Image (cartoon, rainbow, N blue to C red):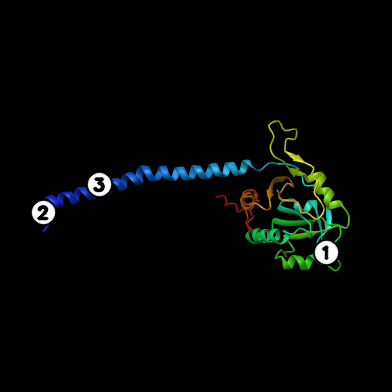
Amino acid sequence: MMSEENSKKTSKLKVYIRNTALLMLIFVMPLVSWYYLSSGLNYQKEARAELKEYVTFPKFDFQTQYGTNLIQDSLKGKISVVHFFSMQDKNLDQTLEKLSLIYDQFKERRDVLFINFCLDEEVPENFSFRTYGVDKKLNDLVQCFFLQRNDPTIRNMLLQNIKTPIAVKENPTDEFQLQATNLPKGESYPFLLLVDEHQKVRNYYHIEKDPSMGRLVEHMAMILPREKKEGAKLVRTREK
């Protein structure tokens, strides 16, 4: 049989465990929760602070791979991931694979567009961007578009209007740290653009840097327009 002394030790141990658990519940756990919640809020604030309003996306009116027209006004009320590419880019397949993965995360959102502008003024004879989009898993009549022109319009739009971000200077002459870029033919523009529902370029994301791609997805989720619930009606209560 357990001695009286051992019984007292066991009781004290139980009380100690109970009091320790209570202390954790009342004081420690709320502090831990507050720390993680505060860290999360700070993280969101830092992420949101990265979203600027660099430039308004320039006007355009091009035919898509589906035979329809896509214009600047098509971006209103939606967010867009914009890609300027060359068919001669050796890393193009990898880039489009990343875009396809991002598209998969947002393919249920009709207000998210993926717009691919081809910088090449000439493409191979009998080449079909419609077939190309299917092959690259970016085939969606509402969300995914490939645009090309047989003139320098798209290239000029990129170089003159979009430009490229540069390293931050102590005394910048350009508030948004942008400059025209001398992009050689046969090369893709190294950044994806995030354009908001008001047609403002909010940030640039380096295609070859995976953390930058991850940040793009986070920023997309942050600025997505709130979904409208279909069939929602305002019902007034009957006055008595």
Report helix, strand or loop for mark 1.
loop
Dot placed on the residue nearer the N-terminal end, 2 or 1 = 2
Distance between the alpha carbons at the discs numbered 3 and 1: 75 Å
Report helix, strand or loop for mark 2.
loop
Counting from the top left corner in percent of width and height, residue 82 is at 73, 53
Q: Name the amino acid type tagged 2.
A: Ser
Residue 78: in sight, yes or no?
Answer: no
Residue shown at the point (42%, 44%) measured from the top left: 32
Residue shown at the point (48%, 45%) measured from the top left: 37
Q: Nearer the viewer, mark 3 or mark 1?
A: 3
**Residue at label 1?**
67
State whether residue 30 is above or below residue 95. Answer: above
Distance between the alpha carbons at the discs numbered 2 and 1: 91 Å
116 or 222, nearer to the observer: 116
State the mark number for residue 3. 2
In the drawing, does residue 188 fall left or right of residue 48? right
Q: Name the amino acid type tagged 1.
A: Gly
Counting from the top left corner in percent of width and height, residue 73 is at 79, 51
Within 10 Å of disc 2 (Cα), the crowding (few <14, some 14-19, many 20+) is few
Counting from the top left corner in percent of width and height, residue 86 is at 79, 57
Residue shown at the point (72%, 41%) measured from the top left: 166
109 or 82, nearer to the observer: 82
Dot placed on the residue nearer the N-terminal end, 3 or 1 = 3
Dot placed on the residue nearer the N-terminal end, 2 or 3 = 2
Report helix, strand or loop for mark 3.
helix
State whether residue 170 is above or below residue 65. Answer: above
